[in-house]
Amino acid sequence: MSHIVQIQTEIRDPVAIRAACERLALPAPVFGETQLFSSKATGWAVQLPDWRYPVVCDVNTAQLAFDNFEGRWGARQELDRFLQSYAVEKTKLVARKQGHSVLEQPLEDGSIKLTIQAGAAV
């Protein structure tokens, strides 16, 4: 039996944040207080390609803090790529922890299809 699921991503797992950064060949996330343009944010700072300021992930609230000046200081598509990678990596971590195998298939439109086989950890 197959199911198609749409997910709204909440960034709550530092391990998955790190895995998403590795997946995208980004610098490792750094925990602490980070200066944005006119404010500070505390959490896991992720430096996206060509972004002036990092995205800060608060895993306690699942909130993201960033300042990309409506795209002038960083393309939204880079944030979307990070969120997608986080969702994929978090799903794989949870599935494997529960003893399932995961098959990942990139699709032509840029989305990623994950197939989870129950009880078949690889």
Image (cartoon, rainbow, N blue to C red):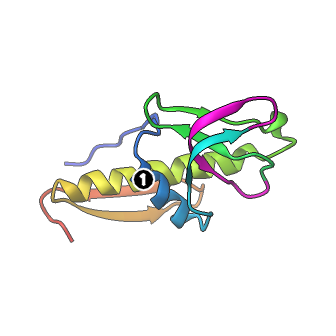
The C terminus appears in which quarter of the rendering? bottom left
Question: Which residue position holds label 1?
Answer: 16
Q: Horizontal and vertical percent for residue 112?
A: 48, 56
Q: Horizontal and vertical percent for residue 99?
A: 15, 59
Return the residue found at the far right. Answer: 72
Image: magenta residue range: 36-50
Where, by quadrant of the figure, is residue 72 drawn? top right
Q: Is residue 106 left or right of residue 80?
A: left
Q: Inspect the image, locate mark 1, and give the three-letter code of the amino acid beneath it.
A: Ala
Return the residue found at the far bottom. Answer: 122
Residue sitting at x 58%, y 61%: 108
Return the residue found at the far left. Answer: 119
Does residue 10 lie above or below 24 as drawn?
Answer: above
Which one is in front, 109 or 39?
39
Residue sitting at x 55%, y 60%: 21
Q: Is residue 38 magenta?
A: yes
Q: Horizontal and vertical percent for residue 10?
A: 45, 35
Which one is in front, 1 or 93?
93
Where, by quadrant of the figure, is residue 121 drawn? bottom left
Residue sitting at x 59%, y 56%: 110
